[in-house]
Amino acid sequence: MRAVELIRRKRDGLPLAPDEIVWLVRGIASGEVPDYQWAALLMAIVWRGLDDGETAALTQAMRDSGRTLDLSRFDQPKVDKHSTGGVGDKTSLILAPIVAACGALVPMISGRGLGHTGGTLDKLESIPGFNVRLSPQQLDRVLERCGLALAGQSDEIAPADRSLYALRDATATVESIPLITSSILSKKLAEGLDGLVLDVKTGDGAFFTEPHEARRLASTLSRIGNALGTRTVALLTSMDQPLGWSVGNVVEVRECLDTLRGSGPADLVELSLRLSAEMLVLAGIETDLRSAQSRARRALDDGSALERFRAVVEAQGGDPQIVDQPDRLPAAPVQHVVTAPRSGYLARLAARSIGHLTMQLGAGRPRVDSPIDHRVGLVLHRKLGEPIDQGEPLATIHAADPTAALHAAQQLLDLAIAIDDEPPPPAPLVLDRLA
Amino acid sequence: MRAVELIRRKRDGLPLAPDEIVWLVRGIASGEVPDYQWAALLMAIVWRGLDDGETAALTQAMRDSGRTLDLSRFDQPKVDKHSTGGVGDKTSLILAPIVAACGALVPMISGRGLGHTGGTLDKLESIPGFNVRLSPQQLDRVLERCGLALAGQSDEIAPADRSLYALRDATATVESIPLITSSILSKKLAEGLDGLVLDVKTGDGAFFTEPHEARRLASTLSRIGNALGTRTVALLTSMDQPLGWSVGNVVEVRECLDTLRGSGPADLVELSLRLSAEMLVLAGIETDLRSAQSRARRALDDGSALERFRAVVEAQGGDPQIVDQPDRLPAAPVQHVVTAPRSGYLARLAARSIGHLTMQLGAGRPRVDSPIDHRVGLVLHRKLGEPIDQGEPLATIHAADPTAALHAAQQLLDLAIAIDDEPPPPAPLVLDRLA
């Protein structure tokens, strides 16, 4: 095969055959297809797209470029969830213990945060001692002990995806639904899952702000996952305001502990239970979403999910005492309360701006190699549509120093919030379901 | 500047600023913009195009990536011609001596042939001793002695174009009108010309078979050349049948000598005189095309063009005796006459197929590094629309051995020609003029 002929074909809008895609992906590692040819091909794919057959072939080839987990010795059904990334999105830390407590195995392999959205691994690492770098043997032991594991992607999982992602990042070819689909699924399907739930965010704080694009991604993820033999459901969910009250790392872990104790913010509880219910149905533990949701709720109410969380913290080397004494988590030196400049209803709480200001505080990564300050972030005291009086606390900024806190407070007031006389119309959290 | 942001901008169909394009082109040599980023950018340009401002900036930046000729010590107006490549296109060897004989300076720097179209340098090198690799000093001396020079592109001319062309060739990004335009003009404008005529071919044997695409290229070449300060005219000309009777190297040089002696094929004479006339008007030697064409015709008729050709052959180390004794040129061992399989009118003489079969005989290069057999080729005895009787000579194949000759004869009859009862409607040679 000649790469230039395959690039030409895609450039002209014609499909590639599965064996051609396999050859191209193998060529990344072998060097037979140099990165400049892949770069041109990636841009042609952004332009012309990939059909489902091509997307499935690409996903499979990238998955098969590395190691896959063998969890066959575990009897439980294996399920996982992946989110396309949101501000304050911490559902993984809640639903993984819930679903494990309900009897499924959750081998959750996550990424780090980049840009204005946080990463599960960064949040977990704000727990002193918590180790996300698990060897296959360690992962196996944690899964056996807890029914769940919260680990980072090893270099052995889908290495072709890592190479291609770096190339996409350098060549402005990230924004392509088939490329995003194959990148997400190649890693998740390497976990050997029975079922996968995808939380595809849309709105101001999401990668795809436009619902129709996010819906196309959700639909493609669901079609390709199912075509490759893993039962896959995608929910389209709103990311117009941060999920829950807190955005950061330590502050989000605290909120997860509150939620696992039964006092979480309504939207976070709702979404965590809904995603848990989807996972339980895919796992075959429940047959319908309603009973699955009740079962998930019971795991929250009876403390069994919290116990799973405590177990996984301990199993992965973290300090389990933070579960009962969250004050053992590191705290930011400055806590600055921002008050409402006027009375009314909170009409805007722009997720993207809030994500950016917490990133600037040090809670997120502007670049892949940026350091993170786990202590900093922001806690909201009101959510969209709630009434507030002038001078009441609107949010608390957790910062490393007073200058950073003041800057963040100013950005919050200038860019992220609006208070109106009327409440905004209520908006649903789950917008669509694609299975 | 960050290359990825510029790629993103082009990907989204937005224009790049001139200084951004300069930075990108400089980044090729400096390594600051790696080839994979350029590859993605090239595909985005194939997709989104470049506007005139961008194309002009790219052309200038590529021209300025290397050395430009300083011909300011010559008093004559400096003009040149470039063809996008055709089968049997040998006008350079005829018009350069004509235009020089009429008083202009013609510093013609040409390329080698690739694929089914021939290259001027290859044709010249079929003259024993002819040296196309001239140092700047040698070029200067040849120009002084002859008023013309027929040289190859040195590595110092537009090196960015050479790098980009190799990358385009490997990434299926050759087919882009602004990229073709900047590649052609960056080299030609490095010659420091007052005027430039472009012969843009269209039809079966041309790079752009579709007239509307070729016209767009012609129009872009003319606009950008003029915008960059060189008076530029582009002719859109037909390449449905080979130009003249002969296709190859030695056979084409013989035909040029015949033409310079006044007995050339009608279409070759017509196009050579028309292009010469355009050059003479651009040079300011004549004010209108009609009188310029008469002057060019006189240079042919009075032998002054032939004397210029003899002078340049001698000045560049070639055997000047070939001018009076063309039999001194090397001849192919096998000359096989193909006869007409039926009587009628020649209705089809497919340029591309004829180009391919002469390439297979060894007259052209399937790859950049393929060797050339200057002796081989084909001489037609009839052109489109001419009557022929069954058994009359249709063409003579010049081949290295009988097997190759028979194969070429079969291809000619099977793929390239058709004889009908009626002559085809006459078609013009010059289809349009864009200035």
Image (cartoon, coloured by chain):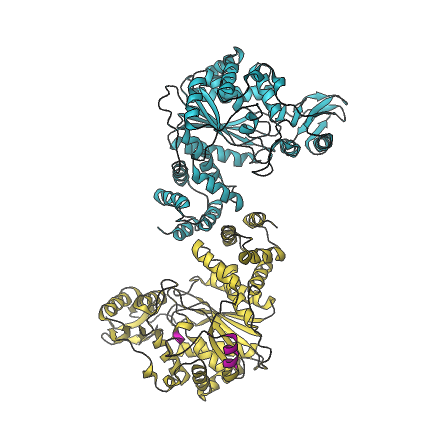
Chain colours: A yellow, B cyan
- x and y, in percent, of residue B147 in the image: 44, 19
- Single out the residue that lies furthest toward the top: B302
Side of B131 where B246 appears, left or right: right
Q: Can residue A90 be seen in this view?
A: yes
Number of numbered discs visible in the structure rendering: 0
Would residue A50 be visible to someone looking at this image? no
User: Residue B194 is drawn in which quadrant?
Assistant: top left
- The answer to whether A35 is drawn above or below residue B390 in the figure is below
Residue A232 x/y as whole percent: 56, 71
In percent of the image, x 49 and y 81: which residue is there? A142
Quarter holding the C terminus of chain B? top left
Residue B72: quadrant of the picture: top left
Relative to B303, residue B381 above or below: below
Give how far across and how far down residue B81 sits, in percent.
Answer: 48, 26
- Does residue B18 appear to the left or right of A64 in the view shown? left
Judge whether residue B200 is colored magenta.
Answer: no
Which residue ends up furthest to the bottom in the rendered image? A302
Name the foreground residue: B415 vs B310: B310
Q: In the figure, B325 relative to A371: above or below?
A: above
Q: Would residue B339 appear left or right of A133 to someone viewing this image?
A: right
Specify whether residue A131 is painted magenta. Answer: yes
Question: As rendered, which of B252 and A235 lies closer to the eye?
Answer: B252
Magenta stretch in the rendered image = A123-143
* Residue A141 x %, y %: 51, 81
Say whether residue B107 is left or right of residue A379. Answer: right
B151 vs A356, nearest the viewer: B151
